[in-house]
Image: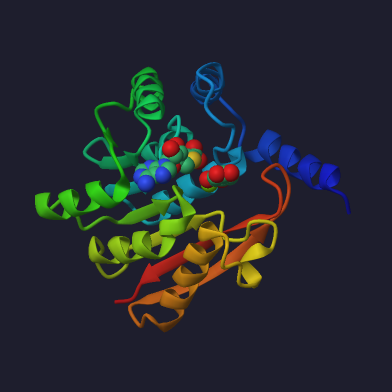
Amino acid sequence: MTNSQWTAVDDYFTDTIAPADEVLTAVLDASRDAGLPEIAVAPHQGKLLHLLATMQGAQNILEVGTLGGYSTVWLARALPPTGRLVTLEYDPAHADVARANLARAGLDKLVEVRTGAALDSLPQLEAEGAGPFDLVFIDADKANNRLYVEWALKLSRPGTVIIVDNVVREGRVATAHPDDPAITGTRDMFDLIGREPRLDATALQTVGTKGWDGLLFARVVD
Ligand code: SAH
Ligand code: DHB
Ligand code: MG
């Protein structure tokens, strides 16, 4: 099978069961127009985040890595009117685009985009008593993946769901790459989760529009 066939299947899934609407299209258009990198989750992956947040009955969601707010919209649409989503973004230009996108989506009452390095914002959230979060989506600088999972655990409760994007990276995760901090950070994260009795986890590889990559799913045990 070739990547064009894999992409055709992604497009088929998206067209049939996860179609774009005006808001999602506008988010991607505005992000592209602002010069943001085109690395948001694929539409059917956004739909997966939305379904998991809905199944979880999530009221309080944390996202690490906002970009233009595309995954944020999918997640925030699972919230009840009393829900809350905090999303952490290092780049002020990305955060500005995301805020405008979320306002256009009518989600700005539910979502706070917090600018700064996530490793600075996470202790602030703890100090504010912002947790526990029902669902955490980690999709920022991969070098800090182990630290982000540790913070997710700190801000969790039994039953919290933790999802991590980009855990395969063209298969590179399977072997040590000491020169690549993104792979090292992700492998350290797998080691941590494997020996952390408070986490139950699995991971899935993906092909298609986002290339050969994958997602990790964890749940804080009861
Ligand atoms: N979740 C988004 C994509 C995020 S891309 C979506 O699917 O739509 C990764 C984002 O993480 C980028 O916007 C990048 O600026 C941000 N980022 C990188 N390092 C970060 C850090 N240390 N703290 C917070 N955000 C960071
Ligand atoms: C990159 C980051 C992502 O979060 C992603 O989903 C794909 C690519 C990147 O930094 O290249
Ligand atoms: Mg990603």
What percent of the width, then of the height, locates residue 191?
A: 47, 77
What percent of the width, then of the height, locates residue 151?
A: 29, 61
Which of these two is toward me, 69 or 150? Answer: 150
Q: Residue at x 36, y 29 (%)?
A: 95
Q: Residue at x 45, y 69 (%)?
A: 189
Left or right? Give the position of 114 relative to 1. left
Q: Which residue sits furthest front?
A: 179
Q: Residue at x 42, y 53 (%)?
A: 138
Q: Quadrant of the N terminus?
A: bottom right
Which of these two is toward me, 137 or 76? Answer: 137
Left or right? Give the position of 146 relative to 125. right
Q: Quadrant of residue 86?
A: top left
Q: Is residue 172 above or below residue 72?
A: below
Residue 74 makes an appearance in the image = no
Which of these two is toward me, 150 or 135? Answer: 150
Q: Quadrant of the C terminus?
A: bottom left
Ligand 2's quadrant: top right
> How many numbered badges does the structure rendering display?
0
Q: Is residue 60 above or below residue 102?
A: below
What percent of the width, then of the height, locates residue 83?
A: 25, 41
Residue 49 makes an appearance in the image = yes
Which of these two is toward me, 105 or 31? Answer: 31
> What kind of colouring is applied to the model shown?
rainbow
Left or right? Give the position of 81 relative to 94. left
Left or right? Give the position of 40 relative to 15. left
Q: Which residue sits furthest left?
A: 128
Q: Is residue 26 above or below residue 18?
A: above
What percent of the width, then of the height, locates residue 73?
A: 42, 34
Q: Residue at x 30, y 56 (%)?
A: 134
